[in-house]
Image (cartoon, grey):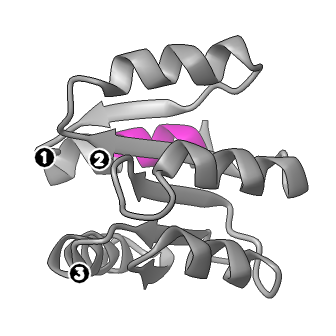
Amino acid sequence: MAKRVFVVDDEKPIADTVAIILRNYGYQTTAFYCAQDAIEQTEVFCPDLIVSDFAMPGMNGIEMSVQIRRRYPECRILLFSGQATTVDLRKLAEAHGHDFEILAKPVHPEELLARITAMLEG
């Protein structure tokens, strides 16, 4: 059975493109454009992995990930960001007991797929 992956990014073209790439490699993917929608959908279908932008309006990727991990600790999280402040926020999350994989934007599709494969199959 295909692994379920949620892709979350407030930039619709990015979320849709990443979802298409993952679908082409056999993952069952759904794109979301806000963190709250992804959180609500986890109540229906808990994903194996969430691939999310870090910086989004309303709720950032770490805040979303913390909420999802509280409910589903087995869900893997991969965040990507083009912002330098990500390192500081990751350290803050780690200080509170949360550890997430982070990739820098722009992410090459091969690097993204390699990381996802390692997380889901490794």
Mark 2 touches mark 3? (CB < 8 Å)? no
Q: Nearer the viewer, mark 2 or mark 3?
A: 3
Mark before the other along the chain sequence, 2 or 3? 3
Q: Secondary structure at mark 2?
A: helix
Q: Secondary structure at mark 3?
A: helix
Q: Residue at x 31, y 71 (%)?
A: 10
Q: Residue at x 43, y 56 (%)?
A: 52
Q: Nearer the viewer, mark 1 or mark 3?
A: 3
- Using the image, tell me which numbered label, if any, was put on residue 112: 2
User: Dividing the picture into quarters, in which one does residue 39 lie?
Assistant: bottom right
The amino acid at mark 2 is Leu
* Residue 87 vertical position relative to residue 67 in the rendered view, above or below: above
User: Dividing the picture into quarters, in which one does residue 48 lie?
Assistant: bottom right
What quarter of the picture does the C terminus occupy?
top right
For label 3, the residue is: 12
- Using the image, tell me which numbered label, if any, was put on residue 108: 1
Q: Residue 90's spot in the image, x, y percent?
A: 49, 22
Q: Secondary structure at mark 1?
A: loop
**Residues rendered magenta in the picture:** 114-119
Q: Residue at x 33, y 50 (%)?
A: 55
How crowded pointer 2 is (Cα within 10 Å; few <14, some 14-19, many 20+) is rated as some
Q: Residue 102's spot in the image, x, y percent?
A: 40, 32
Q: CA distance from mark 1 to mark 2?
A: 6 Å
